[in-house]
Amino acid sequence: MSPIIQLARELHGIELIVFFDEINTSSCLGLFKEMFMDRTLHGKNLPENIFFTAAINPSSTPASTDNLVHRLDYIVHQLPQALEGLIVSYGILESKTLGGYIRRKISMFDVSSSNNLEARMPLDNFAQDILCQLILAAQEFCEARLGKNTVSQREIQRCFNLIDFFWKMRYDDETNASYQPNPIRCITLSIALTYYFRLPTEEDNRQRNDQHTPTREDLGNLLSDIIPDFLEIIQFELEKFVNADNFVIPHGVAINQAVREHLFAIVVSVVTRTPLCIIGAPGQSKTLSFQIALQNLQGPQLSTKQFCKRLPSIDPFFCLGSKYSRSEDIAYVFDRAIQREQQYKQYRMKTRCVVFLDEASLPDENKMILKVLHPYLDECKVSFIAVANKSFDAANSNRMICIYRSRPSEFDQKILAYGCLGLDIKMENQMIDSHIGGIVQGLCQGYREVLMSPDIPKIFHDRDFIYMLRELRFELTKNSADHNVSTDGITPISLLRALEDNFNGINEQQFKKLVEIFYDAVQKESDKFLLASKEPDKIIYRNVPTIMRESMGLESVRRRLYGRYKLIIDESEDESAVHLLFQSGLLSSDPKRTTVFRMSDFAEDINNELRNTEILSNIKLCMETGKTILMVNTERIHGSLYDVFNQNFSIMATDDTRKIFSKVAIGPKTIDVAVHEDFQCIIHVKRNEVEHIPAPFLSRFQKYSLSVKDFYRIQLERLAENEQTMIKNVEEKVQSFIQHFGRQYFYGLNENTLYSCLLSLIKINGNDQYYLSNPSQHYSQLTIKSKSFIEKNPTDVQQCLVRLILSQLIQLASPESIILKLPTLEDSIAQSLCTNYFQQQEHFNIENFLRELISKPFIGVDNSELWENSTDESRTESNIIITKKVMIFTRTSSYLDGLNEQTKSEFFNNDDFNGYDGNLTDKIDILNLASIENSVGLQDGFHAFGHDEQKAILIIVIDAQQSHHIPFLRQLIDHAHYTYNTDMQKQAKYFLMLVHSPARQLYHQFCFASIFLNDWNF
């Protein structure tokens, strides 16, 4: 405002008009209220000769925008009440006025002369009349059926621009000297792109149960009164434009209606620099269509097809949308593209810069992220294409051609299925005898029923169906002599395997229901397609670890066609699935083969771009070297890796080498990164997060559900029958004890706690045979004193196992709980538990506990007594487990609040103790999480502890209100334990997490689950 104010004071005799556009998208409306109403700016009076006016978009908030084909709302802020009285509603043009406006615009419109492209000439009167009727009818239809603000004068001008393009564009080989442009064809296609393609089909409305949105058929029937063969012209021109003669279509990609419409619209958008958005569900070939256009439009010299040689080449500028996208990042991409476009114009190169915004619906609308698009879309200096899963607000959609991707019809889905299977739809009638036609029909029908089934979670999308078909494609073989397709390979068991790979991530009952839906649908079309019932000696269904192991071990040819990265859905609350992946051998603990990326939730880390860039750079290195990565709590950087997750790879191949590249967004820049053939990516999410995960992200992965209970059941089935019976009895007895004692009295107890204890009883020997371990194999330096309680009757192994688990579980009970509940038990059991809890376990003194933790394990125990019942001669003292990772839950106190590195000497006795020189304080490092503000400070503390050979114990003090940091801390501890405890000659390192809660919360809610996995004790 400063230059305007200065000018107003210099020209005091002239009234200056200041116009603000879209004022209610601003975040500083109070400032505008001050200027408009108070006539001041920052408290200073404004000159009297300044007149303010502004334009606003109407404010409305729909209940939900997820399933709307068109949105009538604008993303705006509520105006201050003082400004509400200044609003004047402009409204829309009346039909008569609009008709006059359109006729006047058409009379001024001209096209290239067919004899001389440099000369311009108006449309003939007949074409002008047809165009006027069509635009007027389409505008009124959209205003009446979609909403008053769904169309504007921009659509009218867009029609003229598109007509000019189609007037010049020829599909033939340009050898026909007498060729004359067809005005009806040009008008029809421009109307189709502007109005028709934005609507859903009747089939799409039916599938979405939408009875209100007008359809393409509705508009087509209306416009057919003006051009009788309106719909036929559109379809004919689409097929003439997009086909294998004009474009190189990748093998295995079917040219269905989606690909035709997308590719058609993309080419028109690129050539005319008309902004375009394609809206549709995941897996609808949106990004794929742009990739096809990019591969084909390479200019006159490099394009393969003659048709594409006449079109400009594409120089893409990629931008990946995410919930963390910023306006500055999008603007940066546009500015680079505009600068490059100017260079191409300067050197008269036939190249178009195209800004491609993928996943455009993910940026946070409430932060007005996409408002930055407005000036770029209005100026049209470069081409712009956006793909999204839901519609834009009215302000953005009005500035673009909108293509709504309806859900595929049954015929389109069949074309897609044949294409993914590598078959030609034209061969359908020839394959009836081999049942392939029936099988394909059944698979399509089964998939549609799965999407509609109320029993199946809504986590599956077209991409899952496509990859299932690609996997089945390997079951098809061709005879090289007659090129006939053999369908014997698509067997019931091969379909089951494909379903296990691509439609997983749900519980066992839901998956079996899904399988039943598919098989029933196929059997209706091919009655010989039957899945044999499960035989006692033959396993039909694979378990999740087996499925994952076989999928990750695919040979490169299969991985390229249908291998996807993995999404692990964790059913636990403490991220147990991460430990199970390593425990099962699915992931190697060797950091040279596997890298775990976990982002912290410290306030300073959440918006730390430098930290995000550092993690992305390390991921980039893993991609290049072929390591396996596990990503946990990394949602903040997922948007940067969407192309990687989607396996949108560019391939550079020579006779000797083959390199693949993918795009990674690091900050505002998108770079190409080499991807090693062996690179694997696994994403970890919790079950309660799945419903909030964007559909495009979810559809990119093979999904698997992992829980401690399921993993225990898998291991249980591999035991001998007598051992299965024994461990089931143990489970039943312990469950009975828990019910009697009261679940609420065990801190952190949930369903997985018991199963983690039972899981630890199952071991595997060198011959890969599973067996039930002996109780004596589970003693540690902390539990060796409980031997007399556990092995009260050493000959009764089942009783010993029950007591072993009970001894673990009562560690989770408070002294008050034990005193309260012991009288409810039988005297003998109560006496044994009381002795075990108060005399053989340490619950009262942290210093005594630390001394037990790091002292030699056989103190006070007769060695011969320990092993007198063992039949394994090889067992020695080394069989005692050394526990080095412990989590303690206790009450909050001033003692703990003040515990840190500086005050530790006040809390611990400095007397010497067995096995170590010096005092206890010198062996301890303390990190109090309350004083740590970011992950770097925490990691530095771990690093200093690990490299200090004098230190033995690291205590991390955590307030229960900071419990969301516990998973991050546990990973740091696991990594430090692996790093610093591998060398047995060096000082052993022990880790203790001290989690404290107020007494009132300690008995009513727990901050973290107690799961005995990965050598953790509680």
Image (spheres, rainbow, N blue to C red):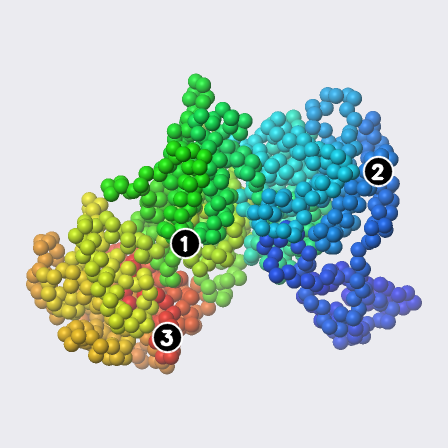
Which residue is label 3 attached to?
1004
Contact between labelled residues 3 and 2, with CB atoms less than 8 Å apart: no
Mark 1, other Cα within 10 Å: few <14 / some 14–19 / many ≥20: many
Which residue is label 1 attached to?
569
Residue shown at the point (7%, 61%) measured from the top left: 868
Closer to us: 426 or 89: 426
- Residue 202's quadrant in the figure? top right
Q: Residue furthest top?
A: 481
Numbered disc 1: secondary structure: strand
Which residue is label 2 attached to?
128
Numbered disc 2: secondary structure: helix
Quarter of the image that includes the N terminus: bottom right
**Three-letter amino acid code at the position of disc 3:** His
- Residue 928's quadrant in the figure? bottom left
Tell me how far mark 2 sits from mark 1, CA to CA.
Answer: 60 Å
Quarter of the image that includes the C terminus: bottom left
